[in-house]
Image (tube, coloured by chain):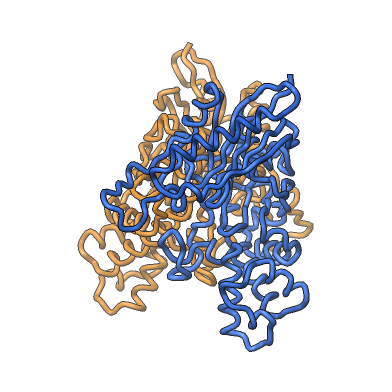
Chain colours: A blue, B orange
């Protein structure tokens, strides 16, 4: 009988899920709102509604299959415990709420979902790690034992694979490469510190760079007509392709910081390849060329001209669902 | 029958080796000169003389045993291929030598030694990785699946263990954490670049720091009476313990740079513990206290107060031999 896994991608706004086979083919998908359940007390209702929607999707297929497991990609996910721990955007206590007890904000989502599905194996990790396993199972990292995945979205996520295994770390939270410090006392980061890589290298980071450059450069730029809150990374890509000097310099600078950081981390795990995934990576040469150049320029001789910088092979709108489902096939 | 492994520690000056059992007890040890064989052409004689000396040592034991394997810790060692590749201090072409062909400077030492011992399993990695495996097999990392070893000698070596396995990387050269860049355009490094961590955090690094501080500080210091070439790290430790302000500031600064770098690398592999090993780590609180403080001060909240900073459990003059022999027990 055909085997399928459910992949779930939990974001702050929506939760998307789908049924996927071992080849990465998606048979059905659906979505529920995450932000409809903002409060700590809403968690049980969220789990119930999500499971009901998943059950409906699972029952909608017209052929018989075996459900092999459920894989979940979620922010602040602890792989070892199957929990979401102190998420910043999910099931929070509203500000000023009395008796808010942060220690209770550990949500055993993997176990809670598994219960609704006759105890089927349910595995959870953060979204970047899920994408990494998706790359290994379905994408361009097939057969690679040592590689790095960099996901460029609103922030910068990462996943490290060594000896053919995902590095989850002692506490299940490894792979927070977006939070290495690249500039002492630099830009404020959502994590509460300053100068983290993702404040420079991400969709938000390049936008901040554009605004800094509009102050330091005098070159004309059509981006000067756009307010901070109206600008997004794809507008910067389009401007750079049209020769806008501010947008082009923003990409060069972004690639410089990413390339330098990659040259450093290569010394630790010595990967065969580094994959760039997500919105900003779709800018192609604009981001790949400077990243590659600065990575090699700063690389220790031992690793020079050895490490491939490649686009992800699972770039699609369903990549997050695929990645989550791959958790099941990888661990069979 | 008792099982023993030979551990070999190859340094630029001497090659030490010994017979070790699975508990880390050393039964016999000996040493030959490495620097007696400086030239590219001397390599075959080095292998022959080393193997003769090892054979003599192996035959000297008064009881019967089984030789389980030979483990080697050496600079520029490629774990996957069992080769020493382009070493900076071993078997070099003298300057100006004609027809020097760097591509020939790959020495298949593991295979060459194995041949002299009836094909016994022979495994080689760099000295820091060997120490890391020694910590895992005999030392304080027993039973840990995720940890980092930092070896503070003339330079800074490192070994990373994730999922219970050494990270050798795609090319066998992973774990060069001493060569992440901590200061753009900073101190010149032996690797040809600038600002590498080991130019600050190592026996040589702290000495360079002392000389920088003697220029920037006005405080009196007995170190001001010692020439650069006469000063070593243990003299700086003694001065710091006696309250010398320059020496104390040098340790604080060294711990600051190491602590920051560790806070960054924790985001990648999320280890249970970080072990400090080697000469400088023997300064105890002088190096541990500032390292710990700056590591926590710069740590992302996810990892705060979770990672133990510990002294190595294999601190002895035979640690390098033990580490090399542990390669055999770890891979049985």
The outermost residue toward the top is B1
B157 shown above or below B257? above
Q: Residue at x 24, y 75 (%)?
A: B220
Residue at coordinates 47% horizontally, 21% vertically from top-left? B60
Q: Position of residue A239 (x, y in %)?
A: 73, 74
Identify the residue at horizontal 60%, vertical 80% (top origin). A213
- The image position of residue B311, as x and y in percent, is 34, 43
Q: Position of residue B238 (x, y in %)?
A: 26, 58
Instruction: State left or right for residue A330 relative to residue B153.
Output: right
Instruction: Look at the image and tell me in which quarter the C terminus of chain A lies.
Output: top right
In the displayed structure image, the side of residue B66 where residue A65 appears, left or right: right
B81 or A300, which lies in front? A300
Q: How many marks?
A: 0
Query: Residue at 56% of width from left, 72% of height from top?
Result: A229
In this view of the protein, can residue B265 be seen by the observer?
Answer: yes
Q: Foreground residue, A86 or B286?
A: A86
* Viewport quadrant of the N terminus of chain A: top right
The image position of residue A169, as x and y in percent, is 48, 40
Q: Observer-nearest residue: B330 or A67?
A: A67
Residue A170 visible here: no
């Amino acid at each position: 009988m055909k085997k399928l896994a459910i992949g779930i991608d939990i974001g702050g706004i929506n939760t998307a899920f789908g049924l996927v086979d071992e080849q990465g083919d998606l048979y059905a998908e659906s979505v529920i709102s995450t932000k409809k359940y903002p409060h700590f007390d809403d968690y049980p209702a969220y789990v119930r509604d999500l499971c009901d929607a998943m059950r409906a999707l699972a029952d909608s297929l017209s052929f018989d299959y075996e459900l092999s497991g459920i894989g979940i990609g979620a922010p602040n996910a602890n792989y070892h415990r199957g929990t979401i721990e102190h998420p910043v955007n999910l099931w929070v206590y509203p500000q000023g709420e009395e008796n808010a007890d942060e220690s209770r904000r550990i949500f055993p989502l993997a176990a809670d979902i598994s219960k609704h599905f006759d105890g089927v194996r349910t595995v959870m990790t953060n979204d970047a790690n899920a994408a990494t396993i998706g790359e290994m199972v379905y994408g361009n990292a097939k057969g690679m034992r040592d590689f790095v995945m960099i996901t460029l979205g609103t922030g910068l996520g990462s996943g490290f694979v060594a000896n053919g295994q995902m590095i989850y770390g002692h506490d299940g939270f490894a792979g927070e490469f977006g939070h290495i410090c690249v500039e002492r006392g630099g830009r404020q980061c959502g994590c509460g510190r300053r100068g983290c890589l993702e404040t420079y290298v991400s969709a938000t980071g390049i936008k901040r760079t554009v605004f800094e450059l509009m102050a330091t450069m005098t070159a004309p730029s059509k981006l000067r007509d756009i307010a901070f809150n109206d600008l997004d990374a794809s507008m910067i890509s389009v401007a750079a392709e049209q020769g806008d000097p501010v947008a082009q310099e923003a990409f060069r600078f972004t690639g410089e910081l990413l390339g330098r950081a990659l040259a450093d981390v290569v010394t630790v795990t010595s990967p065969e390849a580094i994959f760039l995934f997500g919105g900003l990576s779709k800018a192609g040469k604009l981001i790949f060329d400077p990243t590659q150049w600065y990575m090699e320029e700063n690389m220790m001789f031992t690793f020079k001209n050895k490490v491939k910088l490649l686009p992800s092979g699972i770039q699609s709108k369903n990549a997050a669902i695929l990645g989550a489902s791959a958790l099941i096939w990888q661990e069979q």
